[in-house]
Amino acid sequence: MPDCFIALGGNQGNVRETFAHALDRLNQHPEVSLIKTSQWIETAPVGNQTNDTFLNGAAHLKTTLSPEAMLAELQTVETEMGRTREVRWSARTLDLDLLLYDQVVLETAGLLIPHPAFWYRRFVLDPLTEIAPEVIHPIKKVTIKKLQQRLLKRPFVFSLAGLPAEETAAIIQELKRHYPQVAFCHWEASETTPQSMTPTLIAWFDTEKSDTSFESLPEIPRIDVSEYRNNTGQIIHILQSALDF
């Protein structure tokens, strides 16, 4: 049976009880078996949509369901547990994310596997590392443990690529106000950056004036954040999820 890894999150009601019910519900499915769960960890909320602390964790399942059917089953369980889908980063009773399905790489209108953001989110990687440290990320080609450990190195180096120098400087100035401990740099000016400052993450913006393509950037740290060019708040959310747990 294919191995499937999911993330669990929630911050409304008795979340531990909700997690238990959700996993029991999944385990009762004739084509799903619960293999292992991580410890549940308390995490700070990302963004400003809620102030309530989240509980997060990860689970290892085996299933004969297709990836699409597995996603549908997770969403059904979310709904049964009172989940409503309204505002991103908002308060919720239960969030079940399909992270990995064996070594499948899949992109459809409603499903991306592996989950496109989990590899730089501490609140996902920390519990996932507990139960699947040696599992290989099918795109990044490194273990889950290595992805998590990259985020622990200090200084945390955040590089911006694709933007004109003046715009990059303005964004960095704003980001520094929120995260003074982070080392920021401009990718296109890397010749002036110390070699010791290997980027932990590279945020790439698709602009007509840039000579840097997304494909030219190193595979592991690159993130396409083009849709957030005029929304520094979303960049702050990315940083917060990579730094905090």
Image (cartoon, rainbow, N blue to C red):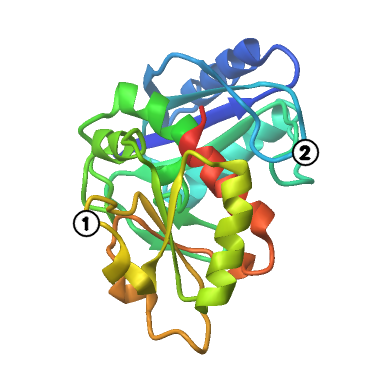
Corner quadrant of residue 52: top right
Q: How many marks?
A: 2
Task: Report, in whole angstroms, how far the alpha carbon at label 1 lies from the one at label 2.
Answer: 38 Å
Corner quadrant of residue 169: bottom right
Q: Position of residue 19 (x, y in %)?
A: 58, 18
Could you tell me which residue is drawn at 71 percent across and 46 percent down? 88
Specify which label sits upstream in the sequence, 1 or 2. Answer: 2
User: How many neighbours does mark 2 have within 10 angstroms: few (below 14), some (14-19), or many (20 or more)?
Assistant: few
Looking at the rendered structure, the kind of residue marked 2 is: Gln
Q: Read off the residue under disc 2.
A: 49
Q: Secondary structure at mark 2?
A: loop
Q: Is residue 177 visible?
A: yes
Relative to residue 83, is residue 116 depicted above or below? below
Q: Position of residue 154 (x, y in %)?
A: 34, 36
> Residue 195, labelled with which disc?
1
Could you tell me which residue is drawn at 50 percent across and 76 percent down? 165
